[in-house]
Image (cartoon, helix red, strand yellow):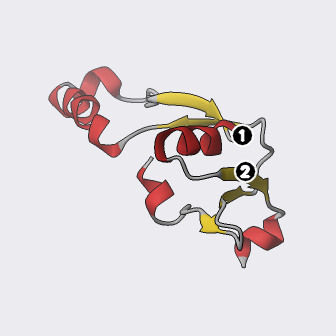
Amino acid sequence: MQNWLSSLKPKKSADGTMIFALPVDEKTTLHMVDIEDTGPIITAILNDPEKYVGQDICMCGDAIQFSDVPKIFTKVTGVPASAKTLTEAEYRL
């Protein structure tokens, strides 16, 4: 989730709307995790590594559609926001 504050930070449009832009469809489900929530999981793995060898471990606090990110942002901050699907070329700029 902290990536929304840095590499995925929304940009402000001319009218003040915050634009969340990614190269994914707005219906794509994003698996969100707060880095502060990873501690107990990492601790469990380090305390019993043999139990976890060869396993895929999914860490997800919330699974939400990309289109819901700006809705949640607006609800929390009161600032209008929207989602925009970028092409790969646009994202790489």
In the rendered structure, the answer to whether residue 47 lies left or right of residue 81 reads left
Q: Position of residue 12 (x, y in %)?
A: 62, 68
Q: Position of residue 24 (x, y in %)?
A: 76, 49
Q: Residue at x 54, y 63 (%)?
A: 9
Q: Residue at x 30, y 35 (%)?
A: 37
Crowding near the residue tagged with mark 1, few <14, some 14–19, many ≥20 C-alpha atoms within 10 Å:
some
Disc 2 to disc 1: CB gap under 8 Å: yes
Q: Residue at x 68, y 41 (%)?
A: 66
- Please tell me whether residue 44 is drawn above or below residue 93 in the rendered image: above
Q: Position of residue 40 (x, y in %)?
A: 22, 30
- Please tell me whether residue 53 is drawn above or below residue 11 in the rendered image: above
Confirm whether residue 38 shows in the render: no
- Please tell me whether residue 76 is drawn above or below residue 51 in the rendered image: below
Where on the picture, by quarter, is residue 53? Answer: top left
**Circle 1 — which element?**
loop
Q: Residue furthest bottom?
A: 93
**Label 2 is placed on what type of residue?**
Ala
In the rendered structure, the answer to whether residue 2 lies left or right of residue 51 reads right
Q: Residue 83: which numbered mark, if any? A: 2
Crowding near the residue tagged with mark 2, few <14, some 14–19, many ≥20 C-alpha atoms within 10 Å:
many
Q: CA distance from mark 2 to mark 1?
A: 6 Å
Q: Position of residue 19 (x, y in %)?
A: 67, 60
Confirm whether residue 49 shows in the render: yes
From the viewer's side, name the closer residue of 71 and 92. Answer: 71
**Circle 2 — which element?**
strand
Q: Residue 67: which numbered mark, if any? A: 1
Q: Residue at x 70, y 59 (%)?
A: 21
Task: Assign the C terminus to one quadrant of the image.
Answer: bottom right
First in sequence, mark 2 or 1: give its number: 1
